[in-house]
Image (cartoon, grey):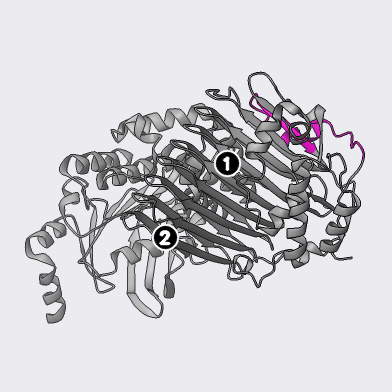
C-alpha cells in the first residue's frame, strides 16, 4: 500500500484514539486528514517542490505506531544533548515521551508535553487560542501532521518571564522498527516581555530509515525574545521535513538558526508572520553536506505591518553529489511601509557534481521599503588557499579553514557559547579536520 | 641554498619568466628589482609553489632538492616562506590560532611533537614585541580589517614565528608609512643569520635603505638583465629602469 493510503486508512482505523471525539481538536484533525487526502504528498510538479523529490523517501514501509519502552538511558544519548549546560529537556524516543531523558517543569513556566496540554483543562484556553493558528492549514504536510496530532513539546512562558536556562527538545529514533515515521507537533507560546532559548534536534540511533514530518508553532507576543537553534546532523538514513511557523507581535524579536550538517533529505519550511509593527525576524543557516545528501531551505517572511525588519543569511557548502536548495520568499504587503528586508545566500560548490538551486523571491507591494537580496555560487578562493598552504597548512586543513571563514558570520551570532562550541566541533568533524584549536 | 636554473614559467600558455638564473647562499640578502609587469611576483609565486603557474623549462633547487613536484605546504615545511603582497583575510581565525596551526602542521610534517603551549606563548610574546605588535591584535581575525601596514607587519611576524631558511618578501614595502617600514626592516634585520637567506622583491629602492642587500638583480620582461651590489639599487633609483632598457637595446 502506498504511504498516503496507509496514513489515511490508519487515521480512520485509530480515530478517536486518546482524544475526545467531541472536542474541537478532533474536528481540526478530521478536517486536516481530509485536506491531506485530497492533496497528497507534494510532487515535483509543484513550484515549491521543484528541486526536492520525496519519491524515494516515501517508498519505505514506515511503521506509524511504534510500541513499547525502548529502555534508552541518558548515557546512551548524552552526546546529542548540549550536556555542558544546565537546561530543561523534553525528549522523545520513537515518538513517545521519555521521562528518564527529560527534565520538564511547571515551576513558573510550562515545559511539558503536547499530550498533557491537550488533555488538561487548565491549558484549554491556550490550546484554543494558539493551536493550529499560525500553521498553514492548506499545506498538505502540515495537515498530515495535524491529523496525527499526538505528542510533542508544549512550552508556555508566561508574561515577563526570562527563562533561566535553555530548553532542549530532542527526538530520538531507536531503530526498533525496520522503518519509522514520526510526526511530532510542538507548540511554543512566549508571553509578553518573556525571553526563551530553545535547541531542537532530531537524531536517529541506527541506520534504519526514519521519516520525520515535524510541525512547530511559535508565538512571540509583545516584546518577547525567542532564540531558536535547530541542529540537523542526522544519519544518512534519516529524512526530515521540518515545518516551523512563527507569529510575531509588536516589538518582538525572533531568531532562528538552522545548522544542516547531515541526514538524507532535509526540507526546512521556515515561515514568519508579522502581526504588528516594530518587530524583527532573523533567519540564519549553515549547510555543509556531502555524499548524496540533500538540504532544502524554503523561507518565508510575510511583512504585513509597517516598520519591521527581517534579516536572512544562509551559507551553503556542497561537496560530492550533494544538492542544495534555497528559496527565500519575502512578501511586503501594501500596508508594510518602511520595511527593511535583507536576504543573503552564499554557496560554495566543492565538486563538479554538487548542485545548488538558489532563488530569491521578493513580492513587494509597498513603495517605501528597503529590500535587498543577493546570492552567490562559487568555489573556494585559490589565492586564499595558496596563502594558507604557503604557511605550511596542508590543503585539506587549509580548505577547512576557508570554509569555516566563509560560514563564520552566521556562527558569530549564536548566543549560547556551548551551542557555538558544539557547532564548531560538528563542522570540524564534518570537514574531517583537527586543527588543534576550536574553530 | 637556492639555485634557480634557466627558469621558464607561465600561466595558461603565456610565458612570463623567460630563463631566470639566480643563486642565493645562506647568510645572503638578494634584492630583485623591476618595473610593473616584469615578472617579479610570478617569480616569488613559482618559488613558493603556486599551482596556477607552469614551469616549462629549467628548475628550482632548494638545499639540493628539485622543488618541481612539491606542494606549497611541502615547500613551507622545508623552510621556504613567502610574504604576500596582498595577504588574504580569514574571518573567524585569530592570528594566534592561525600561527599555532601553521607551526604545528610544519612540526608534524617534520616528525616533531606539537609545540608545548607555554613555549608557543613565549615565542608569540617575543616575536610580537620584536615587531611592536599589540597583544590585542593577536586575538583579531587574521588580516580582517587590518590596515595595509598592519597586514605587512603581520606577514613579518609570521615569518619571525616560522623561522624559515629562505624568506621571500614580495613588495613588503608597498603601502607602508615610514614608521612601519622601519619596524618591518628592523624585524627582518634582527632575524638575519648566517643560516638563512632573504630575497626582497621590490619596485622601489626605499626598502633597501633599511635592509642592505648583498646582491641586486634587475628583472625586465621575465629575464635578469643586470646583477650587481647594493650600489645598483641607487643607480636604478637615480636613472630609472629606462636606462637599463636602453643599455639592453644598445647591447
In this rendering, the answer to whether A360 lies above or below B89 is: below
Q: In the visual, does B52 lie left or right of A72?
A: left
At x 74% / y 44%, what residue is drawn?
A184
Please tell me which residue lies in front, A110 or A90: A110
Chain to which the residue tagged by mark 1 belongs: A
x and y percentages locating residue A5 in the rendered image: 85, 63
Decide: few, some or many residues near mark 2? Use Cα within 10 Å; few <14, some 14-19, many ≥20. Answer: few
Q: For the residues labelled 2 and 1, say whether their Cβ atoms are less than 8 Å apart.
A: no
Image position of A100 (left or right of B52): right
Q: Label 2: state its secondary structure.
A: strand
Please tell me the numbered disc located at residue A424.
1
Of all residues, the one furthest to the front in this rendering is A22
Residue A252 on image: x %, y %: 47, 36
Residue A410 visible in the current orientation = yes
Asked whether A179 or A382 is in front, the reply is A179
Q: In x, y percent, where is residue B9? A: 39, 73
Does residue B157 lie above or below A364 as drawn? Answer: above
Q: Which image quadrant: the N terminus of chain A?
A: bottom right
What residue sits 89% from the left and 37% below the top? A70
Residue A428 is covered by the magenta coloring: no
Instruction: Name the side, left or right, on which A378 lies relative to A419.
Output: left
Q: Identify which residue is drawn at 57% across, 54% down.
A: A396
* Chain letter belonging to callout 2: A
Name the outermost residue toward the left.
B238
Numbered tag placed on residue A374 in the rendering = 2
- Location of residue A323 (image quadrant): bottom right
Residue A239 in view, yes or no: no
Alpha-carbon span between mark 2 and mark 1? 26 Å
Compare residues A374 and A291 and report the one nearer the observer.
A374
**Nearest to N terminus: mark 2 or mark 1:** 2
**Residue A248 image position (x, y, % from top left):** 51, 41
Task: Please give the range of residues in magenta.
Answer: A68-92
Amino acid at each position: 500500500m502506498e504511504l498516503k493510503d496507509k496514513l489515511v486508512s490508519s487515521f480512520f482505523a485509530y480515530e478517536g484514539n486518546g482524544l475526545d471525539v467531541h472536542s474541537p481538536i478532533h474536528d481540526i484533525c478530521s478536517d486536516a486528514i481530509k485536506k491531506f487526502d485530497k492533496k497528497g504528498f507534494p510532487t515535483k510538479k509543484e513550484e515549491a517542490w521543484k528541486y526536492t523529490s520525496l519519491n524515494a523517501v516515501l517508498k519505505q514501509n514506515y511503521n506509524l505506531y511504534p510500541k513499547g519502552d525502548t529502555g534508552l538511558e541518558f548515557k546512551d544519548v548524552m552526546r546529542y544533548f548540549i550536556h555542558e549546560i544546565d537546561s530543561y529537556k523534553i525528549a522523545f524516543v520513537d515518538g513517545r515521551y521519555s521521562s528518564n531523558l527529560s527534565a520538564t517543569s511547571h515551576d513558573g513556566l510550562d515545559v511539558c508535553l503536547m499530550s498533557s496540554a491537550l488533555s488538561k483543562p487548565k491549558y484549554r484556553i491556550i490550546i484554543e487560542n494558539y493551536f493550529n493558528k499560525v500553521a498553514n492549514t492548506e499545506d498538505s504536510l502540515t495537515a498530515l501532521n495535524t491529523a496525527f496530532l499526538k505528542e510533542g513539546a508544549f512550552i508556555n512562558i508566561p508574561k515577563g518571564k526570562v527563562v533561566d536556562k535553555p530548553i532542549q527538545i530532542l527526538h530520538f529514533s531507536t531503530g526498533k522498527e525496520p522503518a519509522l515515521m514520526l510526526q511530532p507537533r510542538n507548540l511554543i507560546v512566549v508571553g509578553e516581555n518573556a525571553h526563551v532559548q530553545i535547541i531542537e534536534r532530531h537524531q536517529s540511533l541506527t541506520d534504519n530509515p526514519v521519516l520525520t514530518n515535524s510541525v512547530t508553532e511559535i508565538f512571540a507576543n509583545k516584546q518577547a525574545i525567542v532564540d531558536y537553534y535547530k541542529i540537523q546532523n542526522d544519519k544518512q538514513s534519516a529524512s526530515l521535513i521540518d515545518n516551523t511557523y512563527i507569529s510575531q507581535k509588536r516589538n518582538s524579536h525572533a531568531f532562528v538558526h538552522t545548522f544542516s550538517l547531515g541526514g538524507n533529505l532535509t526540507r526546512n519550511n521556515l515561515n514568519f508572520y508579522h502581526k504588528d509593527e516594530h518587530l524583527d525576524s532573523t533567519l540564519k543557516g549553515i549547510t555543509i553536506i556531502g555524499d548524496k545528501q540533500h538540504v532544502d531551505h524554503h523561507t518565508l517572511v510575510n511583512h504585513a505591518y509597517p516598520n519591521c525588519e527581517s534579516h536572512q543569511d544562509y551559507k551553503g557548502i556542497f561537496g560530492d553529489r550533494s544538492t542544495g536548495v534555497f528559496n527565500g520568499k519575502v512578501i511586503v504587503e501594501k500596508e508594510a511601509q518602511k520595511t527593511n528586508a535583507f536576504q543573503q545566500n552564499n554557496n560554495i560548490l566543492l565538486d563538479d557534481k554538487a548542485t545548488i538551486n538558489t532563488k530569491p523571491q521578493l513580492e513587494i507591494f509597498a513603495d517605501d521599503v528597503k529590500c535587498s537580496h543577493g546570492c552567490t555560487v562559487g568555489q573556494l578562493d585559490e589565492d586564499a588557499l595558496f596563502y594558507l598552504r604557503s604557511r605550511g597548512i596542508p590543503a585539506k586543513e587549509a580548505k577547512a579553514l576557508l570554509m569555516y571563514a566563509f560560514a563564520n558570520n552566521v556562527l558569530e551570532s549564536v548566543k549560547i557559547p556551548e551551542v557555538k562550541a558544539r557547532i564548531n566541533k560538528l563542522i570540524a568533524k564534518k570537514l574531517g579536520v583537527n586543527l588543534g584549536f576550536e574553530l | 641554498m637556492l639555485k634557480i636554473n634557466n627558469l621558464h614559467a607561465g600561466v595558461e600558455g603565456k610565458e612570463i619568466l623567460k630563463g631566470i638564473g639566480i643563486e642565493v647562499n645562506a647568510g645572503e640578502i638578494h634584492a630583485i628589482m623591476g618595473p610593473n609587469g616584469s615578472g617579479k611576483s610570478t617569480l616569488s609565486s613559482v618559488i613558493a609553489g603556486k599551482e596556477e603557474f607552469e614551469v616549462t623549462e629549467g628548475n628550482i633547487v632548494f638545499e639540493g632538492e628539485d622543488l618541481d613536484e612539491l606542494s606549497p605546504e611541502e615547500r613551507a615545511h622545508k623552510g621556504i616562506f613567502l610574504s604576500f603582497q596582498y595577504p588574504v583575510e580569514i574571518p573567524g581565525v585569530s592570528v594566534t590560532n592561525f600561527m599555532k596551526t601553521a607551526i604545528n602542521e610544519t612540526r608534524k610534517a617534520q616528525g616533531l611533537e606539537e609545540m608545548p603551549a607555554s613555549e608557543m606563548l613565549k615565542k608569540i610574546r617575543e616575536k610580537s614585541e620584536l615587531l611592536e605588535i599589540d597583544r590585542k591584535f593577536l586575538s583579531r581575525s587574521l588580516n580582517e580589517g587590518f590596515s595595509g601596514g598592519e597586514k605587512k607587519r603581520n606577514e613579518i611576524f609570521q615569518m619571525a614565528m616560522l623561522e624559515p631558511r629562505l624568506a621571500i618578501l614580495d613588495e613588503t614595502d608597498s603601502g607602508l608609512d615610514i614608521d612601519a617600514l622601519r619596524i618591518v626592516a628592523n624585524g627582518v634585520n634582527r632575524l638575519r643569520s648566517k643560516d638563512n637567506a632573504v630575497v626582497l622583491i621590490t619596485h622601489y629602492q626605499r626598502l633597501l635603505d633599511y635592509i642592505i642587500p648583498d646582491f641586486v638583480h634587475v628583472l625586465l620582461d621575465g629575464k635578469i638583465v643586470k646583477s650587481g651590489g647594493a650600489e645598483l639599487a641607487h643607480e636604478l633609483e637615480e636613472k630609472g629602469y629606462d636606462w637599463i632598457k636602453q643599455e639592453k637595446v644598445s647591447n
